[in-house]
Amino acid sequence: MTTPHKRFEEITTEMTDLYKRKNEDYGDSFSSSLDEFGVIAGVVRLSDKVNRIKALTKNDSQQVKDESIKDTLKDLANYAIMTLMWLEGNGGVDDLAKDEEE
């Protein structure tokens, strides 16, 4: 039986592979959007994925057969990590919190 820690590693490896494949297909369009519009671009993509999960859990029939809740959760996690990476490279999370306080 797979331990939770081992399964976590397997899932994050799958997410890394997905991230690499999508970056090959799309280029670094997500970071480009963040560069152009700021962190809100990341928030919008995260929100889109959360809304997709809500729709998948509320509806019995799924129109888009190739995007499961599992796939959408992986996308959500990858978008969160990519947003964090962008923040770290552009002043960091601490600077964002300071901006919100002002």
Image (spheres, rainbow, N blue to C red):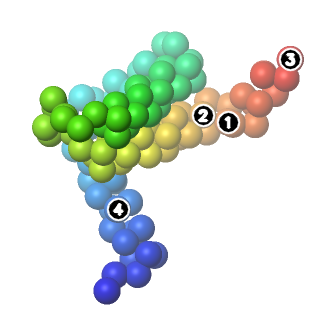
Query: Image quadrant of residue 59?
Result: top left
Q: Earlier in the sequence, mark 1 or mark 2?
A: 2
Q: Which residue corresponds to the image point at 61% horizontal and 30% vertical from the top-left?
A: 90
Query: Which label's residue is closer to the chain start, 3 or 4?
Result: 4
Q: Which residue is mark 1?
A: 92
Residue beneath disc 3: 102
Mark 2: give few (<14), some (14-19) or many (20+) Cα within 10 Å. Answer: some
Residue at 69%, 36% in the rendered image: 93
Task: Locate residue 84 relative to residue 68 in the image: left or right.
Answer: right
Question: Tag 4: Cα neighbours inside 10 Å, few (<14), some, or many (≥20)?
Answer: few
Q: Earlier in the sequence, mark 1 or mark 3?
A: 1
* Residue 11 numbered tag: 4
Using the numbered discs, state the Cα–Cα distance from disc 4 to disc 1 in whole angstroms.
26 Å
Spatial CA distance of label 4 from label 2 is 24 Å
Whether pointer 1 and pointer 2 mark residues with C-beta atoms closer than 8 Å, the reply is yes
**In terms of secondary structure, where does tag 1 sit?**
helix
